[in-house]
Image (cartoon, rainbow, N blue to C red):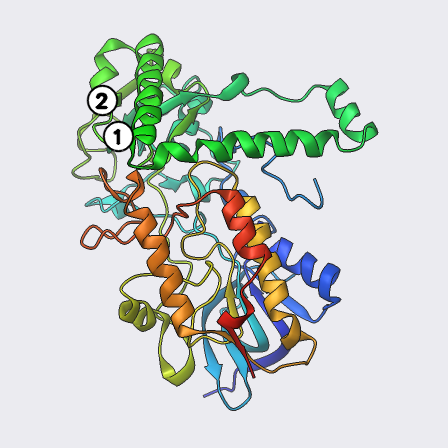
Amino acid sequence: MEKQKRFYSDVVIIGAGLSGIDMACQLQRQLRVSDYVIYDHAQELGGAWAANKYPGCSVDIPGALYSLSWFPNPFQTEWKGARWVEASGTWLVHLCDLNTKEEFFHEAKVLISAVGGYTNPKLPDLSGLDSFEGPVVHTAKWRNEYDLRGLNVALVGNGCSGSQVVPAVVNEVNRLTQFIQSPQYYVPMPMGNYRFGKALRVCFSCIPLTLLLIRWLVFWILDTSLGQFYNNSKGDRLREKRAVCSRKYIEENAPERYWPLLTPGYDLGCRRRILDNDYIRSLRNPRMKLVKDSITQVDSKSVITGSGEKYPILATGFEFSQWKADSVIGRGGKTLKQHWEDRGGIGAYKTVAMNEFPNMFYLLGPNSGSGHTSVLFAIECSVNLVIRIARPVLQRQASIVEVCKGAEIEWCDTIQTALSKTVLTGSCSNQYTDPKTGWNFFSYPFSSLNFWIDTRFPTMKHWEYR
């Protein structure tokens, strides 16, 4: 067998999205570490924003907050797995060049996974989908050369992506049939999707702290909305108030025949609410049809539940498989999957580290997700924690750092106990909660301020250096 190539760097970062970019910048800014490599399976920087280019794609968090606070390498390389090498105290990262299909290894003192969850398409299980003669497109694989003008289109899914696609394409197609899976909570875009005018942008440039003040104002407004997720009297009142507003918005803007299809039977907050950018009003377009019936089969020319030629656009969500649970192997040959099975569910101490996996950190790790504020804030907090903890290793003051087993277990138990008191694990099915155990691996149940405190002031006794 031909010997595979092998390289060495102090740090290997998997993922060239916003997490990976921020991690690389902070390695240089704070630690003066330049011996790092970023790998990504895509062709360019951007992560989820490089993958998702479908018509109408947008962010649902105000731009003043959805940005890195400190500033308003090889691509097309797939991460196959990683193994901890006890003898050398390094990670051996298994990679594949997607152009040549050549596999190789990169050895690193520190391994950082900055792979997000919104780049791996989740395809629906539809009989005959492979036989369809027209293009089958997931929104995460959209390319600008796709032309929908005059076509009959079947859109599968009605989450955030599906709801953004409709108003962007409905006036181009001959017929758009959207197959919905379950109702969602829709709320109008705050301030009508307001964009900063030229005068205000000049103020941001010329008047110190103006943009920072707006950023913190948005932060506090969004962070105080966390109360609606809790199962208590205050949370019940807030959810009911927002649910009433959502129903009123639907009834004022959508055709009456669609009201039953657009009214959820679960608590607001169990799934991410959708900020509507003209989707609900688009349902009045005569070219648009909304159906609850599921697609049972697809043949070479048509979707069986409809008639005529169809052009499926798939907006069915994403596979949260970014952690490579089967192929990341830590101390003693234990995989991440085995580690999490022993713990009872997917989790990580302060969302970044696991015992038995020394010198390895996750950005956008388990329970770092938020349903009410900007994920970039969590990324920055996690990056700063990793910088603080990895500093002695990267500055050669220690060889290995590993979170203590007891600290990891206590942290994960605290997170799951808090989540059990919220709507995030309750009244609906979602892709980040185990339906058998109720274990939620995605959501952080406390405020963003709390997350900042947790990551800004690490408890050093919870970490073992050697």
Q: Nearer the viewer, mark 1 or mark 2?
A: 2
- Could you say which is closer to the camera, residue 75 or residue 324? 324
Q: From the image, which quarter does the N terminus lie in?
A: bottom left
User: Dot 1 corresponds to which residue?
Assistant: 180
- Taking the image as shown, residue 270 lies to the left or right of residue 171, namely left
Q: From the image, which quarter does the C terminus lie in?
A: bottom right
Q: Residue at x 35, y 25 (%)?
A: 238
Q: Residue at x 22, y 37 (%)?
A: 427
User: Which residue appears farthest toward the bottom when viewing the image?
Assistant: 87
Q: Residue at x 55, y 88 (%)?
A: 88
Task: Name the amino acid, label 1.
Answer: Ile
Q: Position of residue 405 (x, y in %)?
A: 40, 73
Residue 60 can be seen, yes or no: no
| Element assignment for label 1 | loop
Instruction: Tell me the number on the disc at residue 261.
Output: 2
Task: Name the amino acid, label 2.
Answer: Leu
Q: Position of residue 197 (x, y in %)?
A: 70, 19
Image-quadrant location for residue 39: bottom right
Q: Give the crowd class for mark 2: few <14, some 14-19, many >=20 residues within 10 Å.
A: some
- Above or below: residue 116 compared with residue 205: below
Mark pair 1, 2: CA separation: 8 Å
| Element assignment for label 2 | helix
- Above or below: residue 169 compared with residue 250: below
- Could you say which is closer to the camera, residue 229 or residue 457? 457
Q: Position of residue 79 (x, y in %)?
A: 48, 66
- Could you say which is closer to the camera, residue 180 or residue 33? 33
Asked if the residue under mark 2 is in contact with the one under mark 1, i.e. CB atoms within 8 Å, the reply is yes
- Above or below: residue 161 compared with residue 29: above
Q: Which badge, 1 or 2, comes first in the chain's sequence?
A: 1
Residue 35 can be seen, yes or no: yes
- Could you say which is closer to the camera, residue 328 or residue 123? 328
